[in-house]
């Protein structure tokens, strides 16, 4: 028990380190989607209207943004104030995976080929640590050091809530079904209901949760006279708690059915000429991203690297094979076979948000729900590998080999994330560092200076303002018209700029005009300097600053 606590504490500290280290400057910049969350959070704080669903930017469930609002209220409108929420939730996910793994493998007899060890012997982490505890520690270690999970634990987007909520929902459900605990079943229902407020992909999770519920009801029906608890009553408690939490969002969707699907309808394989071909292609890309060719979006990954460390990938394959074997093992306890089915179904259903789409594949963000089941299977594979080696070479050699393997993973994750990815030019561009620097510069100017910000680019518009301006709005707290007026900032499109600048010159205003340089707005700059000779460029780099000659 003491060994378990020490090792678990170390893993939690490792998770905290990877998710909070340099959170104030890594990632760099602030991507407009993150900033849009921040702007909704600022507006909610100003108006007191915290929404269940925020319609802008293709629609986003409100829970994550409302939590971010609390962080912004405490820390101010800083990029890291948005991202620290993800870091906290990512760390809590490690805790959830630990408890869930212990529950899933609670009664497990590990076997590989024709060999098995009992549930209380042969641990890779010490003789007093049982097999379920060992798999839990290995799974949480892999999650804590997962470059894939670390990346999204440091970005201010709501998808990071999916692994957390799904892990706790499944944990409390399995525990409640095993023990008959009503409080745990209520918690399972609460987390399930909350899941619908997190990320669109959670809508596949109820199919996973129905498997243990259906199995439990079937077992209860067969042995009703010997059962000490009322299975239908427990399930009713779960459904009631889930529906009670979901109801506010459900009512919103009833009034706004167009927001139920959101952007997923735009990228669905069912809008393609050959959906089956697109589905096969998406599955190939999603499976391949684990081992060969990962997400090439620079915000999500570095240089298309596989999403899994090669060592973790190997353990995952072994764990997957063991789980499939155990599922077919008729001598195994029915509950454990059910647990293997749930684990494999979880992996399958959480791949669907990526494999049912045909844009941006492979897509590490849409498939983020796959992370917990992958890490559970990797933990199972690592422990099975240890037991296999221990049987042939002895426990000491097997332990040394496992430790030498595990010790390679954290430095690799650190190097890829903090040395390669964080310093990559592609990463800086993907997080709009040029817009971020422009916003920080504008925020430091006097309110007496009128700031004209040209935002018309080939991006969707939000409240008649180009999407890149969301970053500037968040840093300057000018999402609302009231604050724009108070801080003397005006957002203008190309076609309106010359007229506004002409009026400002006629009124002898003290002003500065800002244009983004990615891409350069050379046509507008040339027209302004030609039409108004009194203007000159006073700053050029990530952005251009133009103002009248003193």
Image: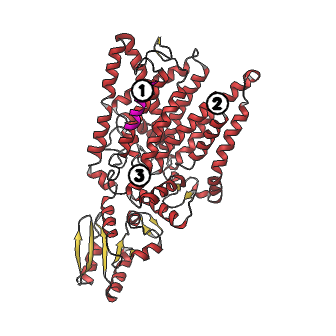
The correct choice, above or below, for 122 with respect to 473 in the image is: above
Relative to 507, 367 lies left or right: right
Q: Quadrant of the C terminus?
A: bottom left
**Residue 370 or residue 101, whichever sits in front:** 101
Rendered image: mark on residue 83? 3
Relative to 348, 541 lies left or right: left
User: Residue at image x 41%, y 50%?
Assistant: 84
Mark 3 neighbour density, 10 Å: few (under 14) some (14–19) many (20 or more): many
Mark 1 neighbour density, 10 Å: few (under 14) some (14–19) many (20 or more): some
Dot 1 and dot 3 residues touching (CB under 8 Å): no
Q: Nearer the viewer, mark 1 or mark 3?
A: 3
The correct choice, above or below, for 204 with respect to 460 in the image is: above
Relative to 261, 185 lies left or right: right
Residue 140 sits inside the magenta stretch: no
Dot 2 and dot 3 residues touching (CB under 8 Å): no
Give the residue pinned by disc 2. Answer: 177
Position in image of residue 231 (x %, y %): 71, 31
Relative to 361, 539 lies left or right: left
Magenta region:
1-13
First reached walking from the N terminus: tag 1 or tag 3: 3
Tell me how far mark 1 sits from mark 2, CA to CA: 29 Å
User: Residue at image x 51%, y 32%?
Assistant: 99
Q: Secondary structure at mark 3?
A: helix
User: Residue at image x 35%, y 79%?
Assistant: 448
Tell me how far mark 2 sits from mark 3, CA to CA: 36 Å
The correct choice, above or below, for 124 with respect to 372 in the image is: above
């Amino acid at each position: 028990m003491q060994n378990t606590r020490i090792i678990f504490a170390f893993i939690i500290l490792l998770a905290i380190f990877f998710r909070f280290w340099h959170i104030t400057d890594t990632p760099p910049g602030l991507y407009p989607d993150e900033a849009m969350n921040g702007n909704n959070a600022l507006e909610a704080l100003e108006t007191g209207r915290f929404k269940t669903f925020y319609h802008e930017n293709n629609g986003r469930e409100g829970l994550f943004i409302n939590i971010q609002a609390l962080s912004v209220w405490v820390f101010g409108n800083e990029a890291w104030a948005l991202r620290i929420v993800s870091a906290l939730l990512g760390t809590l996910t490690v805790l959830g995976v630990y408890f869930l793994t212990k529950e899933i493998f609670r009664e497990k007899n590990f076997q590989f080929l024709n060999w098995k060890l009992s549930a209380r012997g042969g641990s890779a982490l010490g003789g007093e640590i049982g097999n379920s505890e060992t798999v839990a520690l290995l799974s949480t270690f892999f999650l804590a050091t997962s470059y894939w999970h670390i990346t999204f634990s440091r970005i201010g987007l709501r998808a990071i809530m999916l692994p957390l909520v799904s892990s706790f929902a499944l944990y409390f459900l399995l525990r409640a079904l095993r023990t008959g605990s009503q409080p745990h079943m209520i918690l399972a229902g609460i987390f399930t209901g909350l899941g619908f407020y997190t990320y669109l992909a959670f809508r596949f999770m109820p199919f996973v949760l129905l498997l243990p519920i259906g199995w439990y009801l079937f077992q209860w029906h067969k042995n009703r006279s010997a059962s000490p608890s009322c299975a239908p009553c427990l399930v009713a408690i779960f459904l009631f708690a889930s529906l009670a939490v979901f109801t506010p969002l459900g009512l919103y969707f009833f009034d706004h059915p167009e927001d139920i699907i959101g952007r997923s309808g735009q990228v669905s394989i069912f809008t393609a000429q050959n959906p089956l071909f697109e589905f096969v292609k998406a599955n190939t890309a999603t499976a391949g991203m684990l081992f060969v060719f990962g997400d090439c979006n620079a915000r999500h990954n570095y240089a298309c690297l596989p999403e899994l460390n090669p060592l973790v990938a190997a353990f995952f394959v072994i764990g997957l094979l063991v789980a499939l074997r155990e599922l077919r093992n008729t001598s195994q306890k029915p509950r454990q076979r059910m647990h293997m089915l749930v684990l494999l179904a979880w992996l399958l259903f959480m791949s669907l948000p990526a494999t049912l789409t045909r844009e941006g594949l492979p897509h590490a963000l849409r498939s983020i729900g796959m992370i917990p089941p992958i890490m559970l299977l990797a933990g199972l594979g690592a422990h099975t590998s240890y037991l296999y080696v221990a049987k042939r070479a002895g426990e000491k050699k097997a332990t040394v080999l496992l430790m030498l393997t595990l010790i390679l993973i954290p430095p690799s994750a650190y190097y890829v994330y903090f040395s390669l990815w964080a310093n990559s030019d592609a990463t800086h561009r993907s997080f709009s560092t040029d817009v971020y620097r422009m916003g920080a510069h504008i925020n430091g100017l006097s309110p007496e200076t009128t700031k004209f910000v040209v935002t018309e680019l080939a991006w969707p518009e939000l409240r008649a303002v180009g999407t890149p301006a969301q970053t500037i709005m968040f840093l300057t707290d000018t999402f609302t018209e009231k604050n724009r007026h108070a801080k003397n900032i005006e957002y203008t499109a190309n076609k309106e700029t010359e007229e506004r600048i002409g009026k400002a010159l006629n009124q002898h205003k003290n002003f500065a005009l800002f244009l983004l340089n990615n891409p350069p707005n050379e046509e507008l700059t040339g027209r302004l300097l030609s039409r108004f000779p009194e203007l000159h460029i006073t700053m050029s780099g990530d952005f251009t600053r133009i103002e009248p000659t003193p």
